[in-house]
Image: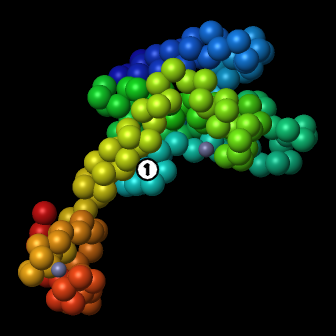
Amino acid sequence: MNNVNQIIKNSKESVLKTMSKMDFFTENDLNSLDLVKIGLLRKNSVYRHGVTRFLPKNKWSSKVPDPSCVKVVDIHPLLLNYEWETYREIIIFHEFIHCLGYLGHNKQFYKLESLWPTINQKDTLGRKFMEVLKLKNSTWKWICPKCNLKVLRQRKSSGKYICKKCNCKLIDEAI
Ligand SMILES: [Zn+2]
Ligand SMILES: [Zn+2]
């Protein structure tokens, strides 16, 4: 088994183990989640850190989807790094709730999500993770020569953008 598969397998086991202590999910929920395949998102994805992809609806008939209707849960490849372990498990747990048929981000969903022991770190870690991804995917800095505002972008501004504060044309600097 290669490293990626090993990390995914361990994370899944760890998430399911934590879920088994929550007194909400049934044995059946956990067993069927164990069969869900976990794959990877494209590495240039910035705003999406995990996604549950269901099979086409004609392949499952039940009104409320369950884990057997899931094609794959994809997570961001950077989440496999050791330093993102906490956030990785939060994301997998989040997607597993979707797999169990809670599709929307509503009150009920967030109530379930809040059962996760480190859920209070989710927003901070998510923001941090996004910043890292933005930086990784940027090749240009747009700089205001007057106030020194810096914006990270994938393409050049080519003189088409101005600083809102100073009304100055932004200049490009390669990262
Ligand atoms: Zn979601
Ligand atoms: Zn400025």
Which of the 4 image quadrants contains residue 4? top left
Could you tell me which secondary element the residue under label 1 belongs to?
loop
Q: Is residue 69 visible?
A: no
Residue 99 position, x and y percent, is 70, 34
Q: Residue furthest front?
A: 165
Per the image, the residue denoted by label 1 is 42
Is 151 placed above or below 132 here? Answer: below
In this view, 28 is above or below 4 = above
- Check the picture and name the quadrant holding the N terminus: top left
Q: Please state which amino acid type lies under the numbered disc 1.
A: Arg
Question: In this view of the protein, can residue 33 be seen by the observer?
Answer: yes
Q: Nearer the viewer, residue 150 or 2?
A: 150
Q: Residue at x 28, y 48 (%)?
A: 132
Residue in view at x 8 percent, y 80 percent: 145
Q: Is residue 62 left or right of residue 72?
A: right
The C terminus, quarter of image: bottom left
Q: Horizontal and vertical percent for residue 3?
A: 35, 23
Q: How are the residues colored?
A: rainbow
Closer to the camera in the image, 175 or 102? 102
Classify 87 as above or below 61.
above
| Front-most of residues 42 and 52 | 52
- x and y percentages locating residue 174 in the rendered image: 12, 69
For the point 47% across and 21% down, which residue is it?
11
Q: Residue at x 38, y 38 (%)?
A: 125
Q: Position of residue 93 (x, y in %)?
A: 57, 29
Residue farthest to the left, as pictured: 145
Q: Quadrant of ligand 1?
A: top right
